[in-house]
Image: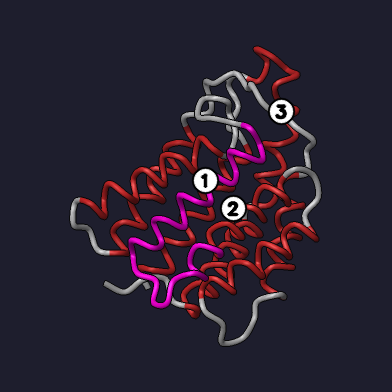
């Protein structure tokens, strides 16, 4: 089974940047309701920098590490460190593989989730990007265990991320600036979960060709 190649990782980051850019206004609108009001535009700037930093003819691990570093350097607020950690942790796992396959990508996604959890100290139900990333990682593993090909597993992850993001609407935030609002945070889609769903959607679209 073919894994995430260097060219595919490059296309993933470029597709994620395009989706984030297209939704930057909506992500910022979501953030204005329960956060700083800058998530979409910050992340748009960060992913544009990530695209500019993509190395030529590099394996997947190096591609993701370079993108993660650029996101940390160019994205304001908490989003830069969180997205940067997500991509760098995934990149390090793939960088240690001679010929990364679909299972290696699953391990990379798991490492990405662990990194985000450690940095943000958030768990599912806190109304953060973890609420999209955690079900995505679980769905990817379940689909792969069930015999799905790589594109199918990536699609399962993307669908689970989208559902996880939608599930943040009735939650009361327990982390980040939104938590200061208490019950007033209920009824709003978490912008970090929404952008995470876009990144997983980009992965699925990339691997589906």
Vertical order, 16 against 118 (above or below):
below
Proximity of marks 1 and 2: CB atoms separated by less than 8 Å: yes
> Farthest residue toward the bottom?
57
Q: Quadrant of residue 188?
A: top right
Q: Which residue is mark 2?
A: 86
Stretch in magenta: 92-121
Q: Is residue 91 above or below residue 6?
A: above
Q: Is residue 119 magenta?
A: yes
User: Does residue 185 appear to the left or right of 101 in the view shown?
Assistant: right
**Which quadrant would the N terminus be assigned to in this image?**
bottom left
CA–CA distance in space, label 3 to label 2: 23 Å
Seen at 42% across and 71% down, the residue is 4
The residue to which callout 1 is attached is: 113
Residue that badge 3 annotates: 34
For marks 3 and 2 on the same chain, the one whose residue lies earlier in the sequence: 3
Q: Secondary structure at mark 2?
A: helix
Q: Residue at x 60, y 31 (%)?
A: 122
Q: Nearer the viewer, residue 26 or 134?
A: 134
Left or right: residue 127 versus residue 161 is: right
- CB under 8 Å between callouts 3 and 2? no
Main secondary structure type of the part rendered in magenta: helix
Q: Alpha-carbon neighbours of circle 1 within 10 Å: few (<14), some, or many (≥20)?
A: many
Q: CA distance from mark 3 to mark 1?
A: 23 Å
* Image quarter in which the C terminus is found: bottom left
Q: Position of residue 206 (x, y in %)?
A: 43, 69
Mark with earlier residue (3, 1): 3
Where is 71 relative to 120, above or below?
Answer: below
Earlier sequence position, callout 1 versus callout 2? 2
């Amino acid at each position: 089974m073919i894994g995430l190649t260097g060219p595919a990782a490059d296309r993933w980051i470029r597709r994620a940047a395009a989706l984030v850019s297209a939704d930057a206004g909506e992500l910022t609108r979501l953030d204005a309701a329960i956060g700083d009001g800058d998530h979409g535009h910050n992340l748009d700037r960060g992913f544009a920098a990530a695209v500019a930093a993509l190395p030529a003819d590099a394996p997947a691990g190096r591609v993701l590490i370079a993108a993660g570093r650029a996101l940390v350097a160019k994205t304001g607020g908490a989003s830069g460190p969180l997205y940067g950690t997500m991509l760098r942790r995934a990149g390090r796992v793939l960088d240690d593989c001679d010929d990364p396959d679909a299972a290696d990508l699953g391990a990379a996604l798991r490492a990405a989730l662990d990194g985000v959890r450690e940095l943000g100290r958030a768990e599912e139900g806190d109304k953060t990007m973890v609420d999209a990333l955690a079900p995505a990682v679980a769905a990817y593993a379940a689909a792969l265990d069930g015999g799905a090909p790589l594109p199918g597993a990536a699609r399962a992850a993307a669908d689970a991320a989208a559902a996880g993001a939608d599930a943040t609407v009735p939650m009361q935030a327990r982390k980040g600036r939104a938590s200061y609002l208490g019950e007033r945070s209920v009824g709003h889609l978490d912008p970090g979960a929404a952008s995470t769903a876009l990144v997983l959607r980009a992965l699925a679209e990339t691997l589906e060709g």
